[in-house]
């Protein structure tokens, strides 16, 4: 992959918690840099018209109807000074929104419930392909294709945790790495000894180093330069290997 990292991204989502979740993942990931977080199309367009150097916009397609329709919004994003690419996020998987995204030249249409942790990998992949989807979009795409054919579609698998991580390992890893809790705080929360927490973390690092996920989107990162925690974070959020696309 020849994508230059970090990828500069702008976000718009009127679901505050979804916005903050994605912003946190993108901020912590070494592959992306968050230029702005907005909750409305008006705020998004203001940022784009006032010099924000974004390369890609992650756009929630289910926003209040008082704003411009999706077709107009995508075109205005694409015609802004930075001319960023657009990747659409959807909670419900509307055929109309998908068709609009295709017609307007968006680079992807992703279901929130499927993309979860792997949002950065999806954005990096979307820079390299014509149109990126999550598995649940494929059936919609078959209906949309009759009017808006796509010649090359790539799929990113729905995110799932590494199968070698037991529930206890996954719980400790999530608290320590994703939520940034200290070993004593983690131990107190789940009633373990701090030493056991650290032992679990070492096991998690070891499990995550075994091949399972699709690490092609990590190209450009020198994993050997990263701390064990940062490397494990990047491996934990990768998508499963896909046979499609």
Image: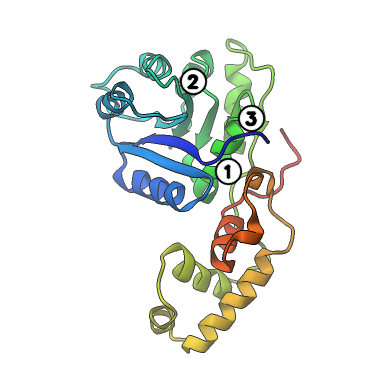
Check disc 1 and report its element: helix, strand or loop. helix
| Residue at numbered disc 2 | 101
Q: Are marks 2 and 1 in contact (CB under 8 Å)?
A: no
Task: Tell me which label, 2 or 1, sits earlier in the chain.
Answer: 2
Task: Tell me which label, 1 or 3, sits earlier in the chain.
Answer: 1
Residue 44: percent from left, percent from top: 31, 28
Check disc 3 and report its element: helix, strand or loop. loop
Seen at 69% across and 44% down, the residue is 216
Q: Is residue 239 above or below residue 184?
A: above
Seen at 62% across and 16% down, the residue is 145
Q: Is residue 33 above or below residue 168?
A: above
Q: Is residue 67 above or below residue 125?
A: above
Q: Are marks 1 and 3 in contact (CB under 8 Å)?
A: no
The CA span between labels 3 and 2 is 17 Å
Tell how many labels.
Answer: 3
Seen at 45% across and 50% down, the residue is 25
For residue 136, side relative to residue 177 (left or right): right
Q: Which mark is residue 121?
A: 1
Q: Which mark is residue 229?
A: none
Residue 89: percent from left, percent from top: 45, 34
Please identify the quarter of the rendering in which residue 69 is found: top left
| Residue at numbered disc 3 | 128
Quarter in which the N terminus is drawn: top right
Quarter in which the C terminus is drawn: top right
Residue 174: percent from left, percent from top: 49, 66
Check disc 2 and report its element: helix, strand or loop. helix
Q: Nearer the viewer, mark 2 or mark 1?
A: 1
Out of 154 and 220, give the one closest to the viewer.
220
Residue 223 appears in the figure: yes
The CA span between labels 1 and 3 is 11 Å
Seen at 41% across and 76% down, the residue is 182
């Amino acid at each position: 992959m020849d994508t230059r990292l970090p990828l500069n991204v702008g976000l718009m989502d009127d679901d505050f918690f979804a916005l903050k979740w994605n912003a946190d993942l993108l901020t912590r990931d070494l592959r992306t840099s968050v230029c702005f977080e907005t909750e409305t199309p008006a705020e998004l367009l203001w940022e784009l018209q006032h010099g924000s150097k974004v390369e890609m916009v992650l756009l929630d397609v289910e926003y209040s109807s008082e704003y411009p329709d999706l077709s107009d919004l995508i075109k205005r994003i694409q015609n802004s000074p930075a001319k960023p690419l657009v990747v659409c996020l959807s909670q419900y998987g509307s055929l109309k929104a998908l068709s609009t995204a295709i017609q307007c030249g968006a680079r992807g249409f992703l279901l929130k419930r499927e993309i979860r942790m792997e949002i950065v990998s999806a954005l990096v992949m979307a820079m390299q392909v014509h149109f990126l989807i999550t598995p649940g979009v494929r059936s919609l795409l078959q209906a949309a294709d009759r009017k808006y054919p796509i010649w090359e579609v790539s799929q990113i698998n729905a995110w799932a945790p590494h199968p070698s991580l037991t529930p206890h390992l996954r719980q400790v890893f999530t608290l320590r790495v994703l939520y940034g809790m200290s070993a004593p705080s983690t131990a107190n929360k789940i009633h373990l000894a701090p030493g056991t927490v650290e032992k679990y973390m070492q096991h998690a690092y070891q499990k995550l180093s075994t091949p399972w996920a699709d690490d092609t989107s990590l190209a450009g990162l020198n994993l050997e330069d990263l701390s064990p925690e940062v490397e494990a974070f990047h491996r934990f959020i990768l998508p499963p290997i896909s046979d499609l696309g």
